[in-house]
Amino acid sequence: MKKILLVLCFAATGIALKAQTTQTTTTTAPAKPEETLLLKETAYDFGKIQQGRPVTHNFEIVNTGKEPLMLENVQASCGCTTPEWSKDAIQPGASSVIKVGYNAANEGAFHKTITISYNNHQIKQLAISGDVFKGPTTSAPVNSSISLLKN
């Protein structure tokens, strides 16, 4: 029984190897578009920011191609993140800025992504992160020493 099982294993292995070596197909992958959008940085950490205080960061992009670069859309992963960008074509060798704002309304850590669509649906992603802390609920207490100085 063991001999039959051993022979069957060898036969199956031989058939599998033969099938792998004889099954060579030549498929050509579609040509990948030339990368023309260079991001100076892909992520930014705001660190600790106070709740209720919106913050912004500018991401610089450069057109490394030979044709004008069009940003078709820049979309954030949620409504608390707002990207702003120029709708004008970026000429070869020129740079532009994508300004990303974050509304620090909720307390706690955050990580948001921004998707850039450009030149016929090519895609790149940016990310922002940070930690929102709760600010004081009232203004600073009255300092009685100030009234003495005024006199």
Image (tube, helix red, strand yellow):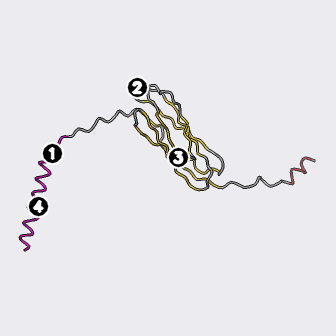
In the image, 150 versus 45, the foreground residue is 45
Q: Quadrant of residue 26?
A: top left
Kindly state the secondary structure of the residue where label 1 is placed.
loop
The disc placed on residue 24 is 1
Q: In which quarter of the image is residue 99?
A: top right
Callout 2 amino acid: Glu
Q: In which quarter of the image is residue 15?
A: bottom left
Ranked by sequence position, the earlier of labels 1 and 4 is 4
Q: Check disc 2 and report the residue beneath it.
A: 67
Residue 108 is situated, as x and y percent measured from the top left of the image, at 59, 56
Image point 56% across, 46% down: which residue?
79
Ranked by sequence position, the earlier of labels 2 and 3 is 2
Kindly state the secondary structure of the residue where label 3 is placed.
strand
In three-dimensional space, the C-alpha distance between marks 1 and 2, rounded to whole angstroms, equals 38 Å
Left or right of 44 in this view: 37: left
Image point 56% across, 45% down: which residue?
81
Q: Check disc 3 and report the residue beneath it.
A: 128
Q: Do the residues labelled 4 and 2 touch (CB within 8 Å)?
A: no
The disc placed on residue 97 is none
Q: Which of marks 3 and 1 is in front?
A: 1
The disc placed on residue 12 is 4
Residue 19 is situated, as x and y percent measured from the top left of the image, at 12, 52
In three-dimensional space, the C-alpha distance between marks 3 and 1, rounded to whole angstroms, equals 45 Å
Q: In this view, does 148 lie above or below 11?
A: above
